[in-house]
């Protein structure tokens, strides 16, 4: 069954600290993986997209990694800011229907 | 801002009623996807419209229906509302069926 699982479910860290969010998937065949940031009550906004051949991709303080062999991805946030408080959702495109499979997200709270 | 707009922003209905949600896609985009997002969950795919025709549907009953107009704007209709239909409804537009999706701000539907 095509699934995307994220951990932790929620995370609280102090402003200025780093953190890493995890995404494991069982989607096959795999096309690409995208990380979204979603502020409360708003639509998701894309942070990065990674294809099979890409291991690392950065977008400012956000760095995503992909290990296609173990089917794992991570999103690392450096020097966190209060505005980073949001849900971070991992989405994999793939499967026989080339569909999008969404994770449940990690809720990140940054405290001053 | 993604250029995708949704209306209304908030809506309160009672069980059994019908509702219509609207979405204007980003200029040049011919594909619109609709998602339902319950509190604390990832978005669940309802259906996608490509050039005015339904192009894929998630696990939602027939009382969830849609339309796409010649200008590629779209409507989501839900009949016989149930309490569990309370959620954030997200619309996303894309250049094509498998391309990056740009999300609107969502419509928050509450069913009492």
Image (tube, coloured by chain):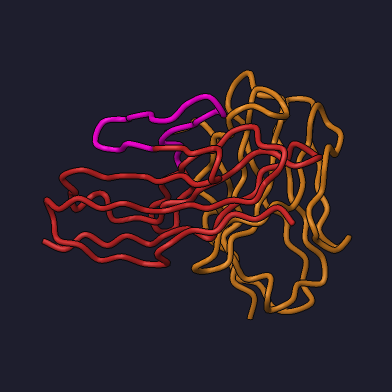
Closer-to-camera residue (A10/B32): A10
Question: Which x, y percent locates residue A64?
Answer: 38, 37
Say which quadrant the N terminus of chain A sits in. bottom right
Name the magenta segment's main secondary structure. strand
Q: Quadrant of residue B92?
A: top right
- Kindly indicate which chain is depicted in red in the rendered structure: A
As drawn, B59 above or below B80: above
Q: Is residue B64 above or below residue A94?
A: below
What segment carries the magenta color? A45-64
Q: Nearer the viewer, residue B39 or A13?
A: A13
Q: Residue at x 83, y 37 (%)?
A: B55
User: Residue A74: image x %, image y %?
Assistant: 40, 46
| Horizontal arrangement in the rendering, residue A5 relative to residue B56 (left or right) | left
Q: Is residue A48 magenta?
A: yes
Percent from the top left, x then y, of residue B17? 77, 72
In this view, the residue farthest toward the front is A69
Q: Residue at x 53, y 45 (%)?
A: A70
In this rendering, would A67 be left or right of A101?
left
The spot of residue A32 in percent (x, y) is 59, 33
Residue B29: quadrant of the picture: top right
Position of the C terminus of chain A, as image quadrant, is bottom left
Q: Nearer the viewer, residue A8 or B77?
A: A8
The structure residue drawn at horizontal position 53% and vertical position 60%, both measured from the top left corner, is A104
Q: Which chain is orange?
A: B
């Amino acid at each position: 069954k095509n699934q995307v699982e994220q951990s932790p479910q929620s995370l609280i860290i102090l402003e200025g600290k780093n953190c890493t969010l995890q995404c494991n998937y069982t989607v096959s065949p795999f096309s690409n993986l995208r990380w979204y940031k979603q502020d409360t009550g708003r639509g998701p906004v894309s942070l990065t997209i990674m294809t099979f051949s890409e291991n690392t991709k950065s977008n400012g303080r956000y760095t995503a990694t992909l290990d296609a062999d173990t089917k794992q991805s991570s999103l690392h946030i450096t020097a966190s800011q209060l505005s980073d408080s949001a849900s971070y959702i991992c989405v994999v495109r793939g499967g026989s229907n080339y569909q999008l499979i969404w994770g449940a997200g990690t809720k990140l709270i940054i405290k001053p | 801002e993604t250029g995708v707009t949704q209306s209304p922003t908030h809506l309160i209905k009672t069980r059994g009623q019908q509702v219509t949600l609207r979405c204007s896609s980003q200029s040049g985009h011919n594909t619109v996807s609709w998602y339902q997002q319950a509190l604390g969950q990832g978005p669940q795919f309802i259906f996608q419209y490509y050039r005015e025709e339904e192009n894929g549907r998630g696990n939602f009953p027939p009382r969830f229906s849609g339309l796409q107009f010649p200008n590629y704007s779209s409507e989501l209709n839900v009949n016989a509302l149930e309490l569990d239909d309370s959620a954030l409804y997200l619309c996303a537009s894309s250049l094509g069926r498998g391309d990056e999706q740009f999300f609107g701000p969502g419509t928050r539907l509450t069913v009492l």
